[in-house]
Amino acid sequence: MTAKKLDIELFSNDIKFQSVGKLSNEIVDFIISKKPEFNNILNSNTDVIFWEDRIKHISAHKDDFISDKAFFNCLEDIPSIIQTPDYISIHPKDNSILFIKDFSQHISVAIRVSFHGNLSIRTMYPLMDSQLSNYINKNRAWKFPTSIDKII
């Protein structure tokens, strides 16, 4: 499935939220294999919602990106980052899942998972190499296998 682009212009038309897609069965199964407590919460039928108020919150991280253009490209690519992550990380305390994509920086999109299984974007920001390595070493982040990884 080809990821659509996040269209922040929609919010100027009194639209307060938009779906950025759904988690694939493969991603849901991967997360549950790492954290079985998500078994009765996550499913692939639930839309991931981007609320208008998240733009202001995410923009607070704009200066952490290598350029304004990189920030806006990553913001627009949030659906793709969620659908094709390079890494997936689970926060140990707050039911957040990080979808991490390697561009010129490691870009992390955090999704909040409610107890009822609702999914919403919390934030987006770049991770330093040391942060990602720390998550991996603490068994809080895992390389998400691509189709090529599965063949090899």
Image: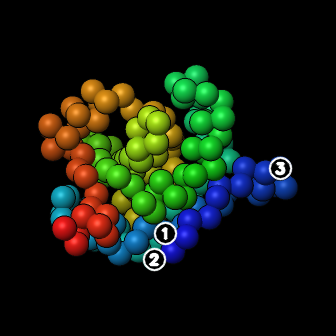
Count of marks placed on residues: 3
Residue 41 can be seen, yes or no? no
Q: Nearer the viewer, mark 2 or mark 1?
A: 1
Instruction: Tell which circle, 3 or 1, labels the residue nearer the N-terminal end.
Output: 3
| Snapshot quadrant of residue 44 | bottom left
Check whether the beta carbons of the residues at disc 2 and disc 1 lie within 8 A of each other: yes
In the rendering, which numbered label is found on residue 22?
1
- Name the side, left or right, on which 78 lies relative to 6: left
Instruction: Tell which circle, 2 or 1, labels the residue nearer the N-terminal end.
Output: 1
| Snapshot quadrant of residue 63 | top right
Mark 3 crowd level (few <14, some 14–19, many ≥20, 10 Å Cα): few
Q: Which residue does the image show at 62% across and 64% down from the upper left?
A: 4
The residue pinned by badge 2 equals 45
Colour treatment of the image? rainbow
In the rendering, which numbered label is found on residue 101?
none
| Snapshot quadrant of residue 19 | bottom right
Q: Which residue does the image show at 79% across and 51% down from the upper left?
A: 9
Q: Amino acid at mark 2?
A: Asn
The residue pinned by badge 3 equals 12
